[in-house]
Image: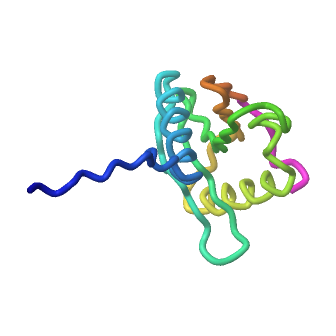
């Protein structure tokens, strides 16, 4: 007599928020590289608590250093992905960007972009915010 097979109705586990965020970053990176930007760093973090993190640091063809925040949302029902980059989040990104730039000998032109991945689309907002007043 064989061992009976146990049939389960369990579906494969849903991807975690981290996995979905990583997928969004992969999509954003590929999109920016197709547009001619070159990756300098991914998930750059400042040391210590209260610092900041930058999803992607890219170099544009004109030499501009581009600090990219990638946001993913399933829908736009709560303002969408781009709208979720709060003033506090912007402040942390600028802090991390300043930390990154301190390592460089000469300061290149810089900008802060947001790539919103939402409902199967990618929206690239170049110059979404600036470091002014921070």
> Does 26 sit left or right of 77 as displayed?
left
Q: Which quarter of the image is occupied by the N terminus?
A: bottom left
Quarter occupied by residue 79: top right
> Does 53 sit left or right of 23 as displayed?
right
Q: Which residue is depicted at the point 24% across and 51% down? A: 5
Q: Residue 20 versus residue 112: which sits nearer the camera?
A: 20
Q: Position of residue 117 (x, y in %)?
A: 64, 32
Q: Which residues are magenta?
A: 126-134
Q: Residue 117 versus residue 38: which sits nearer the camera?
A: 117
Q: Position of residue 78 (x, y in %)?
A: 84, 38
The verdict on residue 8 being magenta is: no
**What colour-coding does the image apply?**
rainbow
Tell me: residue 71, above or below residue 33: below
Q: Which quarter of the image is occupied by the C terminus?
A: bottom right
Total residue callouts? 0
Q: Position of residue 21 (x, y in %)?
A: 57, 46
Tell me: residue 89, above or below residue 80: below
Extreme residue toward the left, this view:
1
Q: Which residue is depicted at the point 54% across and 55% down? A: 43
Extreme residue toward the right, this view:
133
> Does 109 sit left or right of 84 as displayed?
left
Q: Residue 18 versus residue 63: which sits nearer the camera?
A: 18
> Does 2 sit left or right of 83 as displayed?
left
Q: Which residue is depicted at the point 56% across and 31% down? A: 60
Q: Position of residue 52 (x, y in %)?
A: 68, 63
């Amino acid at each position: 007599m064989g061992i009976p097979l146990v049939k389960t109705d369990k579906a494969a586990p849903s991807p975690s928020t981290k996995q979905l965020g990583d997928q969004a970053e992969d999509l954003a990176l590929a999109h920016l590289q197709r547009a001619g930007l070159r990756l300098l760093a991914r998930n750059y973090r400042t040391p210590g608590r209260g610092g900041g993190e930058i999803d992607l640091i890219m170099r544009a063809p004109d030499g501009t250093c581009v600090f990219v925040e990638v946001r993913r949302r399933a829908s736009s029902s709560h303002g969408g992905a781009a709208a979720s980059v709060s003033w506090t989040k912007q402040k942390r990104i600028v802090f991390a960007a300043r930390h990154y730039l301190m390592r460089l000998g000469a300061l290149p032109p810089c900008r802060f972009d947001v790539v919103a991945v939402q409902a199967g689309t990618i929206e690239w907002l170049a110059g979404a915010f600036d470091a002014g007043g921070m």
